[in-house]
Structures are given as structure tokens and as C-alpha cells.
Image: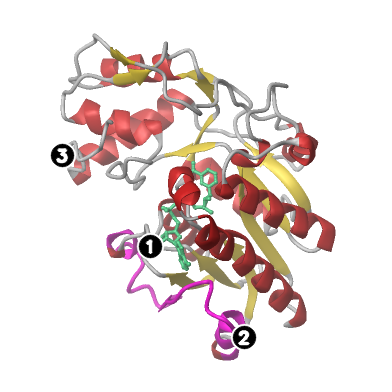
């Protein structure tokens, strides 16, 4: 396969660091950009000294960023736009900043990429683009009639629509991603990383509502595979993709099932603590994955397999100090 120079924005984040790892392992060069808003220097540790990696501490909102990077790296030909404000509650408190980072910066990046003759643009979309959709599993076109529930959802939807309408690049709408390096310390982090954190600290699982709410949990390695397919960099020759694609497993798992599985796999008590349902929580969400499956993509890692890999990582890295905020 032809070796490419790829820009990964958000490379110090959970998913961005896994994607950077995979690209470097496949022999590509990576130009990484992050401003450490929610990312960490330690997420770069595995590849910081790799000669194929060059890091730029910058914000994707910096005007002329892509022009500057292309000037320094003339071979830059693939863009993975992952950098974003990722917290839904934070986006509600800071709608303007969320629009600047999650929409306007992508709009600018997309038009600069076209002007500079870059061949490939892959954007991290989100299931939040569907709002509280009651038709399940969720099909890509439902987002066009949806009311997004937060500035995060609106900005992601506007970016995806822009990409589709431009006929250039693709947006992958991810459901609930989990795996090593997901940060449990924020009160806004994903439910799996919080349960893993509680489990490793032998603490009781805390479930809001009856726990029957369901989510489509996809392991980070499968997410990385979907990025490589989308960019036409898959080792098995799948892709590239154009337009908008759901990325999930197409299966739903209840939060209670998740809590019980984590409790079984760790020293946490089997008894679950139930707390009142939280306002605004979506009841059910899972992806119709038929569109992306036509490219040959299928999530390969089982929920249990992914969970045990995440727990092993948490044990090895001693991330189990139970720093998570259960409020
Ligand atoms: N984790 C999930 O379940 C999930 C689901 C759907 C979509 N996504 C999307 O996937 C992408 C990656 O998410 P993640 O889970 O790895 O989150 P993350 O917070 O770990 O990664 C986001 C990264 O973007 C960086 N960043 C934020 N603002 C920036 C800016 N202005 N300039 C440069 N860098 C900036 C952060 O510092 C961080 O390193 C995001 O776009 C997110 O919206 C994630």
C-alpha cells in the first residue's frame, strides 16, 4: 500500500491516540494536532519518539492551520478530523465555543483541504446527531428529521451535512466507543470507563433509573478499522467511503447488563446501587449498520472481549484510583 502522510486532529485523545498508533504501525506518517483540552500528553507516549510522527500543539480553530501544516508537510494528503469538544453537558454550557470548535473549524478545514488538493477527509460524527430517535435501529437519514438535544449534536450534524453536501470526504457517526485510555475522571465520561473504574476499585456499580436503557457499545479497535476503511487505508483494500455512515455494532446492551458484567469480572460487589433517573438521558440507541457493512466493515470485537481488554489495561496501568465522579 502507498504510504501516506495523515493529519490526525485530537491525536492526544482517547480515539485519536489509537488511530495514530495504527497509522504509524502501518507505515504511514502522522502529523498530530491537539491543544490538550481533554487530551493528555501521556496518550502520546507510545509514539512520541516515532520518526514518522510529528506533533503540533495547536487549536483547530487557529486560522490558516491547514495551510501552515501543508506548507511544512507537502505530502500531507489525508485528514482525520477528531478534535472536538466532546462533552454534551459542557456544550450546553458553552454553545458558542462548541460551534467554533465542532462546526466552524471543520468547515474551514474542509474548504482548505479542497483548495489545497488534499484527497481524503474523514470526520468524527456522532450518534448525538439523531437526538432522542424512537425508530430503532437508527438509519443515517433519520438525522435529517431529528431535533438534536445539545449544541454538541447540532454542531456534529451540521458538519456531517456539510461533508455530504460537498461531495467531498465522509463522516462516521460513532455510537458509544469504549476501550483503553478512555478517561474516567470527568463527570461526563462514558459509562463503561466509569464502571471499569469503580470495578477496579472494588466499589459498587451505580446505575441511574432502572438500568434498562440500552446503548450500542463499540470497541475502539473496530472504530480504528472503520477510520482506515473510510480513508481507503485498510490493509484488506476496503473503502474509501464518501458520505455519512453509522459506525456501531448494531447490537444493544443494557446499562444494567453492563454493570453486572463489570461487577462479575472485578472485585466489585454484585449488588447494584440504583439512583433516580437523570433528566435528559436517552432511553435507547443503537445503529443500523447496513450501509457501512456494504463496504465489508463489521465490528469484530465482542462486548465481553472488549471489556476484558479494557479491564486488563486498567489493571496494568493502575488507572483504578476511582477518580470518577458519580454524581
Ligand atoms: N468516545 C465516544 O464514545 C465518541 C462517540 C461519538 C463520537 N465521538 C467523537 O470522536 C472524536 C474523538 O473523541 P474521544 O472520545 O477520543 O474524545 P477525547 O476528548 O479523548 O479526544 C478529543 C481530543 O480533541 C482535542 N481537542 C479538543 N478541542 C481541540 C481544539 N480546539 N484543537 C485541537 N485539539 C482539540 C482534545 O484535547 C482531545 O485530545 C470526537 O470528535 C468525538 O466527538 C466519540
- Where disc 3 sits, the SS reads loop
Q: Earlier in the sequence, mark 3 or mark 1?
A: 1
Quarter of the view holding residue 36: bottom left
Q: Residue at x 57, y 65 (%)?
A: 100
Mark 2, residue position: 67
Where residue 123 appears, as percent x and y from the top left, is 64, 57
For label 3, being within 8 Å of ligand 1 is answered no
Find the distance from the CA under tag 3 to the CA under tag 1: 22 Å
Q: Earlier in the sequence, mark 2 or mark 1?
A: 1
Q: Is residue 325 left or right of residue 232?
A: left
- Where disc 2 sits, the SS reads helix
Q: Earlier in the sequence, mark 2 or mark 3?
A: 2
User: In the image shown, does 24 or 70 lie closer to the viewer?
Assistant: 70
- Where disc 1 sits, the SS reads loop
Question: Could you tell me if residue 233 is visible in this image?
Answer: no
Q: Is residue 64 magenta?
A: yes
Mark 3, residue position: 321
Circle 2/circle 1 CB separation < 8 Å: no
Q: Is residue 126 left or right of residue 138?
A: left
Numbered range of the magenta stretch:
42-71
Quarter of the view holding residue 102: bottom right
Q: Is residue 164 magenta?
A: no
Label number found at residue 37: 1
Colour treatment of the image: secondary structure
Where residue 60 appears, as percent x and y from the top left, is 52, 71
Find the distance from the CA under tag 2 to the CA under tag 1: 22 Å
Amino acid at each position: 500500500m502507498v504510504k501516506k502522510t495523515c493529519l490526525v486532529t485530537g491525536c492526544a485523545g482517547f480515539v485519536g491516540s489509537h488511530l495514530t498508533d495504527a497509522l504509524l504501525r502501518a507505515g504511514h506518517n502522522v502529523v498530530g494536532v491537539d491543544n490538550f483540552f481533554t487530551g493528555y500528553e501521556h496518550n502520546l507516549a507510545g509514539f512520541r519518539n516515532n520518526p514518522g510522527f510529528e506533533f503540533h500543539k495547536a487549536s483547530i480553530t487557529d486560522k490558516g492551520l491547514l495551510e501552515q501544516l501543508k506548507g511544512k508537510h507537502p505530502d500531507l494528503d489525508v485528514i482525520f478530523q477528531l478534535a472536538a469538544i466532546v462533552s454534551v453537558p459542557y456544550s450546553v454550557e458553552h454553545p458558542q465555543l462548541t460551534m467554533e470548535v465542532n462546526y466552524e473549524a471543520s468547515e474551514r478545514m474542509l474548504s482548505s483541504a479542497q483548495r489545497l488538493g488534499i484527497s481524503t477527509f474523514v470526520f468524527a460524527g456522532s450518534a448525538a446527531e439523531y437526538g432522542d430517535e424512537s425508530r430503532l435501529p437508527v438509519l443515517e437519514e433519520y438525522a435529517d428529521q431529528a431535533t438534536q438535544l445539545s449544541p454538541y449534536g447540532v454542531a456534529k450534524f451540521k458538519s456531517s451535512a456539510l461533508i455530504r453536501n460537498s461531495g467531498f470526504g465522509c463522516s462516521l457517526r460513532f455510537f458509544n466507543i469504549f476501550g483503553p485510555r478512555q478517561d474516567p475522571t470527568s463527570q461526563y465520561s462514558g459509562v463503561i470507563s466509569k464502571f471499569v473504574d469503580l470495578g477496579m476499585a472494588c466499589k459498587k456499580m451505580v446505575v441511574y433509573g432502572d438500568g434498562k436503557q440500552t446503548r450500542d457499545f463499540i470497541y475502539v479497535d473496530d472504530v480504528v478499522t472503520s477510520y482506515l476503511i473510510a480513508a481507503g487505508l485498510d490493509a484488506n483494500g476496503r473503502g474509501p467511503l464518501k458520505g455519512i455512515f453509522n459506525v456501531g455494532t448494531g447490537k444493544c446492551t443494557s446499562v444494567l447488563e453492563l454493570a453486572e458484567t463489570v461487577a462479575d469480572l472485578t472485585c466489585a460487589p454484585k449488588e447494584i446501587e440504583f439512583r433516580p433517573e437523570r433528566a435528559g438521558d436517552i432511553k435507547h440507541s443503537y445503529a443500523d449498520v447496513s450501509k457501512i457493512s456494504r463496504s465489508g466493515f463489521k465490528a469484530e470485537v465482542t462486548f465481553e472481549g472488549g471489556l476484558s481488554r479494557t479491564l486488563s489495561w486498567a489493571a496494568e496501568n493502575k488507572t483504578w484510583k476511582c477518580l470518577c465522579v458519580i454524581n
